[in-house]
Amino acid sequence: MSVGRRSSASATARLSVLVAVLSVPIFTGVWELVARSGIVNTVLFPPPSTVAVAILEWIRSGQFFADLMASLSRVAAGFAIGAAGGIVLGVLTGRFQLVSSLLSPLFHILRPIPPIAFVPIVILWFGLSETGKLFLVVWGVFFTVWLATHIGVQKVDHGLIRAAQMLGTPQPQMLWEIVLLGALPYITVGLRTAVSISFYTLVAAELAGAFAGIVYRIEIAQQNMQTGQVMGGLAALGLLSFIADRSFATLAERAVWWR
Amino acid sequence: MTPSLLRPDQPLRLVDTYPPSAPARQAIIRVEDLSIVFDAPSGQVIAVDRVSLAVAQGEFVSIVGPSGCGKSTLLNAMAGLERPFEGQVLIAGEAMRKPRPEIGMVFQQPHLFPWKSVRRNIAHGPRALGKPKAEALRIADDLIEMIGLTGFASAYPHTLSGGMQQRVAIARALANQPRVLLMDEPFGALDAQTRAVMQDNLLELRERINATIVFVTHDIDEAILLSDRVLIMSAGPGRILKDLQVSLPRPRSSAIVAEAAYLALKRDCLDLIRSEGRRAFEQMEIRM
Ligand SMILES: Nc1ncnc2c1ncn2[C@@H]1O[C@H](COP(=O)(O)OP(=O)(O)O)[C@@H](O)[C@H]1O
Ligand SMILES: [Mg+2]
C-alpha cells in the first residue's frame, strides 16, 4: 500500500518535471499556430519565428552588441555607485543616532517617490546625457540599499559588538568589519532587490531619450512598426535581467560564506 | 618567543596556597558603592544596589545569585560596558568608563565572529591592538593548542559544538593577555556533561594563566568548585549578601563535590540563599 503510494507520488513528480520542460515549447508552439492561423494581425502579433529572425538580424548587424554594452554599462555603473553610497550611508545612519536624525527623515521622504517620476527633472538638469541616465539608476538603487543596510546594521547581534569592544577593536574596524559583515545578510537582500530596480530605472532612462541601448532599440522598432524587433528586444531585456538576478543570487549566497 | 600568558614550566600546586587572605594582597578590582539603575517602561529598575567589593590580584572570585539579581549588570560595569549610576569601579587603580583590552570578557553565548575561522577569531584581539599578523596568528595557534582544539584552527564557528565554541571564546578573550578575565555564566548554555568538562578545563587553564578571574554563575556547585571566594548576591535589587572563603585544596577537579568540607560549604550557601529567597518572597507578598 505504502509502496504503491510512493511510486504514484514519484510518477507525479516525473510528470511535473516533464510538463515543466515542455512548458515553454508548448507556449511558443501555440503562439506560432495562433499567429499563423489568420485570426490575428501578424504585423501587431508576429509569430515567434519572425521574432527569432529579427533577433538574428539584430545580432548580425552588430547593433545588438553595441546596445547590450550601452545598457549594461548604465546598469552596472549606476548599480555600483548607488549600492556603494547606500551601504556607506546605511552603516553610518544605522550606527550613529545623530547621522540618522540628520539624514533618515530626508531619505524617508524621497524614497517612496518612484524613480521614474524624476525623468522630467533629470532631462531638465542633464539633458539627454549619460549623466542623467546614471543619475536615475543610482537614485533607484541607492534608497533600497540604504534602507536594507540601515535596518541590517540595527539588527547586528549586540553581543558581537560587545565582544569586539572588549577586544579593543578600533572604531573604523568596528564599522567596516564587524557592523558591515554583521549586517551583510540583510544587505545582500537589499542588493538583490536593487538589481531589478536598476533595470526598471534603466527602462525609464532609455525611454527618456538615448542613442543606443536595448530599450532604445525597442522604442525605435516600435516607431518603425517592427513588432518582431520590439518583442526581440523585450526578450533580450528579460533574459538579461534574469541572468543578472540569478548570478547575483548565487553571488549573494557566496558573500555570506559563513552560513 | 612564547607569549608570556603561558606558564607551562610552572609546577602544579599540590598544597593549598590559595587564597592568601585578600587584604594582604593588592586588590586589582575595587567596586565602590556601585549602583546601576535602568529606565524601564514601568519606571526605574535598580539592578545593582550600592555594591562594594574587592578582588585581589590573581584571585578567582565567583558571584552567585538568582537570575535577574544584577550579576550581569555588575560584571558589565566591571567591563566598562555599563556606566555607574553612582559609585565607581576601579581596575588597577583606574576608573572603568569604557572597555579596556587588558580586561577580557567571556559571555554566556560565545558571540564568535561567524565570518572568521577559529584561528582568526582568536587572533582578532591582538590584530585589533596592532600586533603584526604573524605574531597574532602565533598567539592564536598557541591558544588553540591550550584549549585542545588543534585541528580545528580553520573551522568556522557554526561547524563547532556549543562547548567548543565557548572554548574558542575563552581563548579569544585570553589572546590579549588580560590582567582580569570576566566570565558571565560562560557554561550556562551548555549541557551538564559538557559543563563538567569545561569546568575541569578552566581549572587546568587557571593554573597556566596570570589573570584574575571574576566568574558569574547561578550554580553554587560550580562556584565552590572553581573559586577562592564566593560572593552571594540577593534577589534584586542586587546587593552582596555574603562573602565566603573557599579554602579547599588545589588543584581541584569535579570529584571534589563528594568531600565533606565541600558539602559543608554548600550547605551554608544554600541555607543563606533559601532564607534570602523566603525573605524576598515574603516582601513580594507584602507588596502585593
Ligand atoms: N538594559 C536594560 N534595561 C532595563 N533593565 C535591565 C537592563 N539590563 C538588565 N535590566 C534589569 O536589571 C536586572 C538585573 O539584570 P541582570 O544583571 O541581567 O541579572 P542577572 O545577570 O543576575 O540575571 C533585571 O531586573 C533586568 O530586568
Ligand atoms: Mg545574566
Image (cartoon, rainbow, N blue to C red):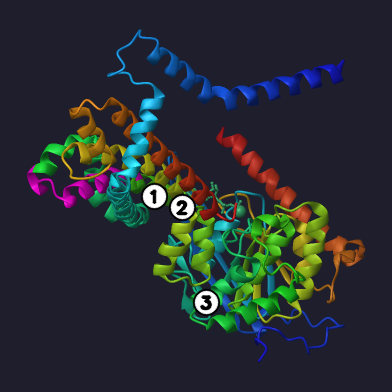
Q: Is residue B160 left or right of residue A41?
A: right
Q: Is mark 3 within 8 Å of ligand 2?
A: no
Asked if residue A139 is among those painted magenta in the image, a careful observer would answer: yes
Q: Kindly check if marks 1 and 2 are in contact, taking CB atoms under 8 A apart as contact.
A: yes
The three-letter code of the residue at mark 2 reads Ala
Circle 3 residue: B127
Q: Is residue A251 above or below residue A233?
A: below
Asked if residue B91 is among those painted magenta in the image, a careful observer would answer: no
Q: Position of residue A9 (x, y in %)?
A: 75, 20
Using the rendered image, report if marks 1 and 3 lie on a common chain.
no
| Span shown in magenta | A124-144
Circle 2 residue: A183
Q: Residues within 10 Å of mark 1 (few under 14, many from 20)?
A: many
Residue A172: image quadrant is bottom left
Residue B198 or residue B82, whichever sits in front: B198
The three-letter code of the residue at mark 1 reads Thr
Q: Is residue B225 left or right of residue A254?
A: right
